[in-house]
């Protein structure tokens, strides 16, 4: 057994674990990220980075590579069936980030990985799968497999950033509250043949929602609500849905990625136990409709880093500090889940189409559109520690 020691071990090198490692290293705290995958997954999940996260990246001094590689979505167009009913602009959001940045998740992870490598070349260990956790009075011991050998790492604190099916959450026996929604979707990235440019478009269609978002490099992501789960997401199915509902053909477009997903709302009943904390999807899963899960994870990681810094550097009483992290971030996670639910509700099939269309038009044409812009850009959730 090969042994090592560090202040903080982060299990999972996804977007949340990598960001958390970066801000801890910047504060002079030793940390190690153990990631079981050998390389970044090139299947894009998230595409939207919200202003609140850009502010966090700005504070960490890493916003520039995101802005250089991403595309700014400053406007969203709303349709009822095929008829345009209004636009939502983000121009009244606080400066300087009056847009949602569109960037594939793998590019985000590449930027974060490069950043933490520059801060400490040994901070990220790939092909390292954590298989056991033992908590002692003053430390946590993790066992992981790496290059056919078993290793043990001893840390003051451990953070589980290991995703929805978190091994760490299971090991500390914290259950997820919540469950699945009935909604299911199919999604694909194509070359962009629309005239929307950098605008997003949302079609509230009586047969089910369709959304499309610009991606960098002249691509566009299409998401359509389906009646039933789709096991094998085929390009033809999405192309046919879009053609049928919108009369728009993607037949000649290049297809880069296909996926299908169901949605859930899951929240860990608490975000720590003893010296082990949870962050990111290990702590909460919200519907990808509205694109806020990863952003919520970064807000939590920011607060988690603040708590860990206080504990490691000042020896503040752990129980109080971690309880605060858990309570406050769970409140934010609940608000985000409600917003995601609103997004999904807007996109469900409507029996009373005419009234619904009038309601949506009114919402968009009156001052309430600013409220929608606030909801879509994750404004007003609060950063309680700063
Ligand atoms: C279709 C789709 C679209 C989405 N769009 C958006 C969007 O636009 N905006 C947004 O904010 N969010 C979006 N999300 C959500 C977003 O993808 C997730 O919230 C985000 O990936 C969570 O990051 P994470 O680092 O917490 O977890 P993950 O990305 O799941 O990373 C966890 C990491 O832990 C590693 N790991 C797991 N177990 C172990 C172990 N035992 N040992 C070592 N390593 C381990 C895994 O290999 C993985 O790399 C979307 C999700 C989906 C499905």
Image (cartoon, rainbow, N blue to C red):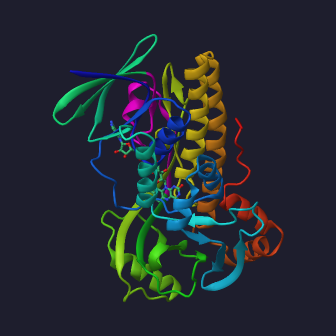
- Does residue 105 sit above or below 239 in this rendering? above
- Pick the residue in front: 123 or 346: 123
Picture coordinates of residue 28 (x, y %)?
53, 31
Q: Residue furthest top?
A: 137
Span highlighted in magenta in the image: 156-182
Q: Residue furthest right?
A: 367
* 36 left or right, relative to 207: left
162 inside magenta stretch:
yes
Residue located 60% across and 81% down the image: 81
Q: In which quarter of the image is residue 191?
A: bottom left
Picture coordinates of residue 354 (x, y %)?
70, 79
- Pick the residue in front: 200 or 38: 38
Picture coordinates of residue 379 (x, y %)?
71, 54
- Does residue 240 sit above or below 53 in this rendering? below
- Does residue 174 sit above or below 228 in this rendering? above
225 inside magenta stretch:
no
């Amino acid at each position: 057994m090969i042994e090592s020691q560090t202040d903080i071990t982060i299990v999972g090198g996804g977007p949340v674990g990598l960001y958390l490692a970066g801000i801890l290293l910047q504060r002079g705290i030793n940390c190690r990220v153990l990631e079981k995958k050998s390389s970044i997954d090139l299947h894009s999940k998230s595409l939207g980075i919200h202003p609140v996260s850009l502010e966090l990246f700005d504070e960490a001094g890493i916003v520039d590579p995101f802005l250089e590689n991403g595309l700014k979505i400053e406007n969203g167009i709303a349709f009822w069936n095929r008829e345009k009913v209004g636009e939502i602009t983000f121009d009244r959001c606080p400066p300087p980030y009056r847009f949602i940045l569109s960037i594939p998740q793998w590019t985000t992870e590449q930027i974060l990985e490069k950043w933490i490598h520059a801060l400490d070349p040994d901070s990220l260990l790939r092909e390292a799968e954590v298989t056991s956790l033992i908590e002692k009075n003053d430390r946590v011991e993790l066992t992981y497999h790496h290059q056919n050998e078993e290793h043990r790492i001893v840390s003051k604190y451990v953070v589980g950033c290991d995703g929805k099916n978190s091994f760490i959450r299971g090991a500390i026996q914290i259950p997820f509250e919540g469950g699945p929604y009935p909604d299911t979707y199919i999604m694909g990235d194509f070359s962009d043949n629309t005239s929307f440019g950098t605008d997003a478009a949302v079609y509230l269609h009586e047969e089910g929602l369709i959304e499309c978002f610009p991606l960098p490099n002249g691509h566009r992501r299409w998401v359509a609500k389906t009646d039933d789960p789709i096991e094998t997401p085929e390009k033809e199915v999405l192309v046919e849905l879009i053609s049928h509902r919108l009369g728009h053909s993607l037949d000649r477009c290049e297809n880069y990625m296909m996926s299908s997903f169901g949605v859930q709302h899951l929240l860990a009943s608490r975000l720590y136990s003893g010296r082990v904390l949870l962050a990111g999807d290990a702590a909460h899963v919200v519907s990808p409709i509205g694109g806020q899960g990863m952003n919520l994870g970064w807000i939590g990681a920011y607060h988690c880093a603040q708590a860990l810094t206080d504990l490691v550097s000042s020896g503040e009483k752990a129980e109080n500090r971690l309880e605060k992290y858990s309570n406050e971030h769970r409140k934010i996670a609940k608000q985000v889940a409600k917003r995601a639910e609103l997004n999904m509700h807007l996109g469900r099939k409507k029996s009373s189409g005419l009234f619904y269309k009038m309601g949506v038009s009114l919402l968009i044409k009156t001052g309430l559109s600013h409220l929608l812009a606030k909801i879509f850009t994750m404004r007003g959730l609060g950063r309680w520690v700063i």
